[in-house]
Image (tube, rainbow, N blue to C red):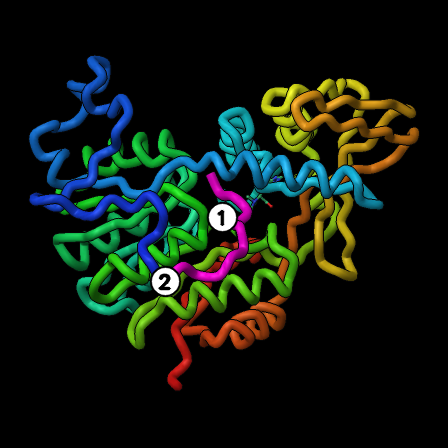
Amino acid sequence: MRRGPILRPLARSPPHGYNPPQRNNLSLPQASPFYLRPENRMSIRAATWHERFTLAGEERSENLAAFAADVRAGLAATPKRLSCRFIYDKVGSELFERICQLPEYYPTGAEREILTRHADRIVGLMPHGVHLAELGSGSSDKTQVLIAALLRAHPRLLYVPMDISRAALESAAEQLLDRFEGLRIRAYMGEYHDGLAFVQQFVEGPKCLSWLGSSIGNLARPAAAAFLQSAGACLAEHDRMLIGIDLRKDGSVLEQAYDDPGGVTASFNANILGRINREFGGDFDLEAFRYEARYDEHRGVVEMFQISRRAQAVRIEKLDLDVSLAADEEIHTESSYKYSLAEIDVLAADAGLGVVEQWFDQAKQFTLVLLEPHAE
Ligand code: AVI
């Protein structure tokens, strides 16, 4: 699951919820750990699990407060808008996993193709004995290709997946630890900025920070450069950052990718309204909205909207909020920015990073870029 970050300054103190390492360097999840559930007992080697997996951070209730604030401000604004990072509750995350399997949604396959073809070369450009930290790790599915290559180069690896979903971190860890013997996982549950602070303070030694899935595209260009800069500030001289970026391309390809004929993307996008109903007692009638994805070629961005089919009033009970929408009024729900090669160079330079090497899929739809901090 890849999600839009919260942009906040890096914390200097340990991230909220970080459990300091205990006697045997463990900070185990508190609530119903999945390795104790009967259905999971056979699937992992429980004895070694405790030594190989730790989880820090917490699922935050302040996330809901931030969602409430976003709903209040966004639905009072003209034009109306909602932030895409709140699409990703359990329902939204499952729908996104389905999007990633759609033939029209090329980024997942393209990024996997690049990783599969170039993983050994990518690893060869990282410092020896590197640790891998990943922003928005989700299912860690494509990352397995990189992990396998890292373990071919060096028999031991510390992997630090970071995600807001405990379920995603736990189920990914279960699979990875089963598959890779030399792997240890120190997971962090939380938002991007807290994850960066965690890496900065608690991951010692050479590291590569990966940010796959073109999640950077969900940030406006200035915010993308600012976030990349704060990520770059976590890197020491020989560290690396590996980032997946979606390239500018023909609008017809993008409109198919972001408005698939089966309507999975439309449902994913409408989940922002569904989530307002579930979390805040809203009475959005999802049938009273249609979905549109439009590519603005000049700005290089796919913009997504929920559009009111008729004039209507919506009540959001728990926020004590009444919203009226005119017929055809739009709510902007998501943007996905695409990059040219020149824009990537500028983005990296603005973030104080240099491009070490860059790879493409055969159709040249997507790129993986390996970055290094600029020498002072
Ligand atoms: C997560 N992110 C990179 C996706 C994208 O391509 O912008 C989210 C998405 N929205 C609709 N389809 C996919």
Query: Which secondary structure, mark 2?
Result: loop
Q: Residue furthest bottom?
A: 376
Q: Which residue is drawn at 86% across and 29% down?
A: 324
Tell me the tag on residue 213: 1
Q: On the rendered structure, is 299 left or right of 212?
A: right
Q: Residue at x 28, y 60 (%)?
A: 201
Between tags 1 and 2, which lies in front? Answer: 2
Q: Disc 1, ligand 1: is the CB inside 8 Å?
A: yes
Tell me the tag on residue 12: 2
Name the N-terminal-most of marks 1 and 2: 2
Q: On the rendered structure, is 300 left or right of 101?
A: right
Q: Is residue 7 rendered magenta in the image? A: yes
Residue 261 seen in render = yes
Q: Amino acid under label 2?
A: Arg
Residue 265 seen in render = no
Q: Disc 2, ligand 1: is the CB inside 8 Å?
A: no
Q: On the rendered structure, is 315 left or right of 151?
A: right
Q: Which residue is drawn at 19% across and 33% down?
A: 178
Determine contact: label 1, label 2, CB under 8 Å: no
Q: Is residue 48 rendered magenta in the image? A: no
* Alpha carbon separation for disc pair 1 and 2: 28 Å
Look at the image and give the residue range highlighted in magenta. 1-11
The quadrant the C terminus occupies is bottom left
In the foreground, 354 or 7: 7
Q: On the rendered structure, is 50 left or right of 77?
A: left
Q: Position of residue 219 (x, y in %)?
A: 61, 54
In the foreground, 239 or 67: 67
In the foreground, 119 or 159: 159
